[in-house]
Image (cartoon, coloured by chain):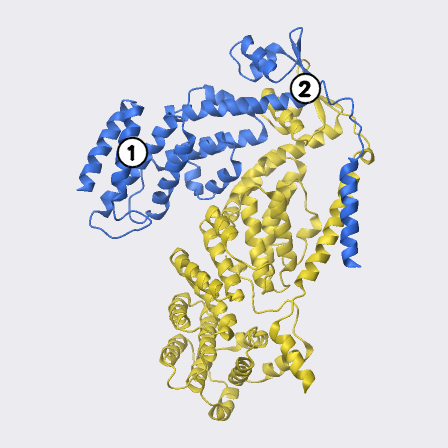
Chain colours: A blue, B yellow
Amino acid sequence: MALQESAALLAKLKDAYSKNDLKTCSSVLDQLKVKLIQFPSLPPVNQPSPTAQQELTLTREALEHACCVSIKQQDEAAMERAFVQLKVFYEDTRSKLPPSPQETTLQGLNLLRLLVQNRVAEFHTELELITPETQALPEVAHVLQMERWLMEGAYNKVLASSQSGTATDLHAQLMSQLATTVRDEIASCCEKAYTQLKLADAQRMMMFDNEKAILAYAAEHNWPVQGGRIFFQVEGKAGKVEGPPPLALINNALMYAKELERIV
Amino acid sequence: MVAEKMDTDKQADGPAPETEAKAGQARQMSPLEALFGLVNVLETSVKLKETKMGRVMRICASTRSQLSPETLRAFFSTVLADDVESKGFLTAHAEQASAGQVAAMDTSEASSSGKAESQKPTNTPEVEIMCFMLLLMNLLDNKKAQQAKEVSIKALQRLSTLNRRTLDTIAARIYFYYAWSHEQTGQLADVRSTLLALHRTTTLRHDSIGQETLLNLLLRNYLHYGLYDQAEKFRSKAQKEDVFRSHQQYCRYLYYLGRIRAIQLEYSEARDCLQQASRKAPTSALGFRVTADKWLTLVRLLLGEVPERAEFAVPGLSQPLQPYYEVTQAVRRGNLDAFAQVAAKYDAVFRADATRNLVTRLHQNVLRTGLKRISMAYSRISLADVAAKLALPSVEDTECIVAKAIRDGGVDAVLDHDTGAMASKETQDVYVSSEPAEAFHARVAFCLDLHNEAIKAMRYEVCCSRMRASRRRQ
């Protein structure tokens, strides 16, 4: 009974999703999730039931759609929740179900989400779960390449690939968010690495569309602009040669005294 | 992963002289006689309510290599009373194990049969569980993992009906063999819930040795499947004492913790843990040290340190660490091509060691060291030359990469976009900065910490002091 109802709801969800009707999607999803709870065979209960396989497949598919919908809604928290639920299916039901065709795509998207949120530690923890074979597949390999570029600092490549219109619109959604993060990174690098920079060059480096945008960005970061050039590192030069901070030294000395007292 | 199995039998602190003499005696005795001696020692410790069983474990270790299934069968049938329910099970399994081998009853064994008759059968549960342990030890030494698995399951069933503190040390061993036999048969995932339940029980019973062993077994179980997230959650939530009771378990714990931290990119903590694990490991546990050193090398490289050549030249370590040595050389030279070659050449090795992802992460360190060398050597160099030297595809990339290196503090230089050049800053006198003070502080803090740790570690067993008191009275 519950199975048929949820199958109907899933069909409705798919329909709405293909029409890009996000509002309907989320309302259908809410109903569907309530129905899914009633399945006995889902983890963590894992009770055997005659329709276990259909139930599991159906739930997995529903959660996959939930992930995609939340990406389209730009709701990262919802995406995280959906993926955590989904991960259980990918890991623990591997022996019971045929693998989902969406699996690698979603794994790639999840990794990309972690990159966007700059959660590198979790990114690597997730990566440990992905076999080298899967890592070589384009959906995941693309994200890995991204991460490497980010780490070594080849930001221009990240920006270029985010603007070149990659595979799916889901990727594009996340990539555009990544671009914002990357721009801030480039800005902070420029601040430290250059003393001055031509406006046109800065605009090209940070991939702004016009000069106005870069001027606004410079104003936001309090960079002085003079004669078509941005000047960095104005402050902080004066007190460059400074000795060890006295307060820290006093604290250290007090700590030594206390510890020694305890020993003697 | 056989190499990783640390030999838990060896006590790091070395046996006291008197026990050493005893062990020497045991070596001349036939295995069967040694086992009978073991039973006596065990029963005395049980009577004295001694929970540590150090001597029992040492005797087990010294007779381990001489045991044969045939001896064990004879031993079980003599020493276990008829009302011990698992007697039949144990002898049957010992027989099954010996079936494949040529039953070589040596002469010393025949001569000791006279003594066998004088040995009284017993029904002490400790002896029974120890019999399980001996059998498991023997089966696993002879690579009969499948049979060992069955025996260990039966042993756990028997253990679940007992609740005696004198059993804890032996029970912890049984847990270890239980997990180990399942790992060898590739069914590690199945035992996870059992281990978790056991961990709960041991925690409730304040059985610290069992708790430590199970904590490590579970961590190993999680890491085997790459479940670093779960491992970290379990580790941080699980109850554990400040000071581990078993030195070996502490080494293992440090190793697993180091691995988790390395994956989470907390390299300095990972380095500290792995370094301690490698240093604290007993000299006989070569396999463990090799594995820990592999991880340690990579973590240190990721931190920007370069291990000394001498560290790879230690006998016994140099051969298994060869791939890591080559990686180190590639990183030190900052040569991207050489690094890619090494990574490809030893891909299978890194995959087996589960360090492949760490090696991939080293890519940027190679770049960084290369860049550092260039900035040290040239006061001003054009970006195109930098790109050529580092074999980078384009000047734009190089500019971004150098900019990031400057921001992260790896390179001390300034970029000039108009001329497309990188100008190194004058190296300033380090003694003007706070760097020496920081280095001094780090050393002092380390020494003080070491002292405090040493004081904390001076923990005396309750029973030891009681025994000493009773001896004084006599």
- Is residue A153 depicted above or below B329 in this figure? above
A208 displayed left or right of A43:
right
Residue B108, above or below A147: below
Up-down relation of residue A204 to residue A87 (above or below): above
Determine if residue B320 is in view.
Answer: no
Name the residue tied to disc 2: A194
Task: State whether discs 1 and 2 lie on one chain.
Answer: yes
As shown in the figure, which amino acid type bears the numbered disc 2?
Tyr
Question: Could one spot residue B200 in this view of the protein?
Answer: yes
Instruction: Spot the residue most to the top.
Output: A227
Splitting the image into 4 quarters, where does residue B416 fall? top right
What residue is pinned by disc 1? A30
Which one is nearer the viewer's eye here, B470 or A203?
A: B470
Q: Along the polypeptide, which appears first: circle 1 or circle 2? A: 1
Query: Which structural element holds mark 1?
Result: helix
**Viewer-nearest residue: A141 or B106:** A141
The image position of residue B368, as x and y in percent, is 65, 33
- Residue under mark 2: which chain is it in? A
CB-based contact (under 8 Å), mark 1 and mark 2:
no
Residue situated in front as seen by the camera: B233 or A146: B233
Q: CA distance from mark 1 to mark 2?
A: 52 Å
Residue B183 spot, x, y in % from top left = 43, 59
| Crowding near the residue tagged with mark 2, few <14, some 14–19, many ≥20 C-alpha atoms within 10 Å | many
Q: Residues within 10 Å of mark 1 (few under 14, many from 20)?
A: few
- For the image, the number of numbered tags is 2
Label 2 element class: loop
Counting from the top left corner in percent of width and height, residue A214 is at 57, 12
In percent of width and height, residue B200 lies at 45, 61
In front: label 1 or label 2: 1
Q: Residue at left 31%, top 32%?
A: A65
Give me the chain letter of mark 1.
Answer: A
